[in-house]
Amino acid sequence: MNDSFFVDPEIRWADLDPNFHVLHSRYYDFAAYCRTKFLVEKGLSPEVLTAHKIGPVLFKESCTFRKELRFGDAIRVYMELVKIMEDNSRWKIRHKITRNDEVISATIEVDIAWIDTSIRKLIIPPPVVARVGELIPKATDFEVAIRKSDFQ
């Protein structure tokens, strides 16, 4: 796999469905954990977001399930930036969830925008967000969008 940022969450008994494989919603939780861990490690902690009165908003989240995850599987969740608006107002992040032997179990893509939490409106985020966006490992198909219409 490329140099994408990754985390290694553990599958818990509570993550399983009645068929004893991981609930579909947990895949999304694993991806969210990966994103938030990256943001916090790179300086966008809840305290920083609160101080700047900003926050991320998910517009779209989709998953392609490939191979089931089961209790006891060692999993890894990767994160890479697929697309970004040149003004940093929107990001598309891809997560790949692998098991044991690097078999891809799922691919999740999320479209993120930034909101001013005091006026509840979408914004072009402050430079602190742009600096963190630059640190996200880039996908092989990474691109910079110029217009919002390019961000579909």
Image (tube, rainbow, N blue to C red):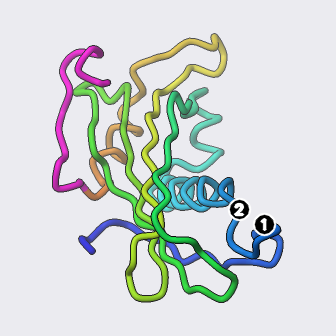
Q: Quadrant of residue 109?
A: top left
Where is residue 138 shown, x and y percent of the image?
A: 23, 54
Q: Which residue is mark 1?
A: 17
Give SS at disc 2. Answer: loop
Under circle 1, the secondary element is loop
Viewer-nearest residue: 113 or 139: 139
Q: Do tag 1 and tag 2 residues touch (Cβ < 8 Å)?
A: yes
Residue plotted at (28% across, 45% down): 82
Task: Name, please, the residue furthest toward the front.
Answer: 19
Q: Residues within 10 Å of mark 2 (few under 14, many from 20)?
A: some
Residue 23, numbered label: 2
Highlighted magenta segment, given as a residue range: 138-152
Q: In the image, is residue 69 above or below residue 138?
A: below
Q: Amino acid at mark 1?
A: Asp
Q: Is residue 111 shown left or right of residue 14?
A: left
Q: Is residue 129 left or right of residue 58?
A: left
Query: Residue at coordinates 65% horizontally, 35% vertically from top-left?
Result: 50
Amino acid type of the residue that numbered disc 2 sits on in the rendered structure: Leu
Is residue 83 highlighted in magenta?
no
For the point 41% across and 38% down, which residue is it? Answer: 129
Which numbered circle lies on residue 87? none
- The residue drawn where x is 54% and y is 33% is 58
Sequence-wise, the earlier of marks 1 and 2 is 1
Question: Considering depth in this image, is 34 or 102 the residue closer to the camera?
Answer: 102
Q: CA distance from mark 1 to mark 2?
A: 5 Å
